Image (tube, rainbow, N blue to C red):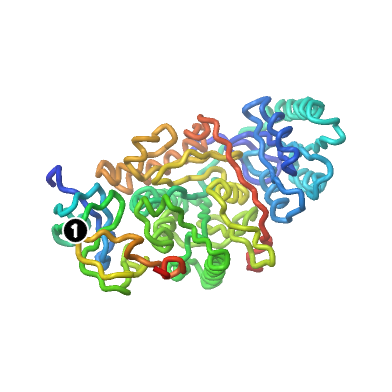
Amino acid sequence: MEENVARVLLLHPKDNVAVALDDIATKSVVAVLGAETPLRLTAQQGIQFAHKLAMRPIAAGEAILKYGIPVGFATAPVAAGEWVHTHNVGSYYAEKKEAK
Amino acid sequence: MDHILGYARPTGVPGIRNYVICIHTVECSSFVSQRIAEIDPRVQSVGFPGCYKNEYASRLMVALATHANVSAALLVSLGCEGTDASALADAIRATGRPVEVLRIQEAGGTEASIAQGRQIVARMLAEIETAPRVQLRVSDLIVGTECGGSDGTSGIAANPAIGHAFDLLVDAGATAIIEETLEMVGCRDIIARRAKNPDVAAQLSRAIEKAEHFSQQVGQFSIAPGNESGGLSTIEEKSMGAFMKCGSRDISGVIKVAEKPSGKGLFVLDSVPDPSPFLFGYSNPNDSEGILDLISSGAHLVVFATGRGSVIGSVIAPVLKVCGNPKTYARMSGDMDVNAGRIITGEATLAEVGREIYDTILDVAAGKRTAAEILGHQEYCIPYKHQSSLCANV
């Protein structure tokens, strides 16, 4: 793999988010590790190391899948390559998040 | 492994460390207790700050005084607090351990109490020199795990690597304990499926439901601002990562604070307060409290995962720190024992780091000092809590 390509890790084939293994620059191409076939994606914005990137478009209300299980839901439509975090994810358990 | 030489105790399992502990039975006696403990590095100080008696805290103090790593205890009482130091001493004495009570009001104040306490402790130190050494097998070990300062690396590096080490421990016949049912919120069904039988599954479901209910009631979910900056968006995302620490083996049972596992295998420690008119503020107020809960249930040592970075150790049991974030490790390597960040950088596999954690656990059991021990960390936290001693009462 080229030295300068940032990596994200897909933890489960069902997942719609992947975890950044490097800091990702805006509009840069990232390599997806853990995918069944070699896969690349363009990051829509800068994404910090250990944060999440959307693997595909996610509708508002749709579950965020990581480890193959729902770890929250989208509170707004999310485009492929977008940063997925508290600004667009709610918790099924913590009410404070659902109020967004 | 035959290189682990433990310390035989009059009752119970042998220890991997040999401490005398000074226990203050109220905050008012904590200063004197700490000053007594300064006499020798083999003496440690721990205690409960509350004046009003709390069954939970009393049970916990007895459990600490009779821990495998503790050979003798001095209870340092002011003299008028609600906790009955004599009753605690009786419970400790029943395990065959030397125990004494020092009452500051009777001894004549600070200076007289420190002098008298140091004399008692010096006698106890002379006695612990004679503790017989015995060979410990891996299957004799009780190992706890906890995490703190989690981030987006936790669920993919440090925690699954610890999980791998826990599988090796369970397969070798050891006892393993995972705490933090508050961080199982959101994963109840997945976790209950890991139970070895339907009874345990029901216990797990009850314990996690209790944690969910408690969280809703106090409006506290176990997720901190640093977890969010580190890439974790929700409690259920953090929970899945935290749960990876316990590996993949069947869960043999649920225990409560200061309760010992009933056998070998993997156990879940429920440290959440039982339903009560008194909520006593927050559960798991900090990582040190969770670590001490594991120790009170017999953990010889605790494996601690971090991503953001943590520096803590503990009284009584070594804390072995595993850091999964390579950037944090680069900044704080002096506080860490295992660098699981190598999984992220691609320098090592999960299995390799898991094996290294397992080997380090055995080395620490055999006497190797952890980073926190070398640095002198001896944190602890015992809050007021209402919790019955029996899991069946959940």
Q: Position of residue A21 (x, y in %)?
A: 26, 49
State the residue in front, B219 or B270. B219
Report which residue position mark 1 lands on: A44
* Crowding near the residue tagged with mark 1, few <14, some 14–19, many ≥20 C-alpha atoms within 10 Å: some
Tell which residue pokes out farthest to the right in this image: B106
Q: Position of residue B131 (x, y in %)?
A: 67, 32
Q: Chain of mark 1?
A: A
Tell which residue pokes out farthest to the front in this image: A100
Q: Position of residue B5 (x, y in %)?
A: 56, 34
Q: Is residue B309 visible?
A: yes
Considering only vertical position in the picture, is B298 above or below B222? above
Q: Position of residue B144 (x, y in %)?
A: 52, 49
Instruction: Determine whether, in the image, residue B19 is placed left or right of residue B154.
Output: right
Q: Amino acid at mark 1?
A: Gln
The secondary structure type at the circle numbered 1 is loop
Total numbered labels: 1
Q: At 73% across and 56% down in the image, what residue appears?
A: B55
State the residue in front, B369 or B264. B369
Q: Is residue B200 visible?
A: no
Q: Quadrant of the C terminus of chain B?
A: bottom right
The picture quadrant where one finds residue B119 is: top right
Instruction: Determine whether, in the image, residue B91 is placed left or right of residue B349.
Output: right
Q: At 80% across and 45% down in the image, what residue appears?
A: B85
The picture quadrant where one finds residue B384 is: bottom right
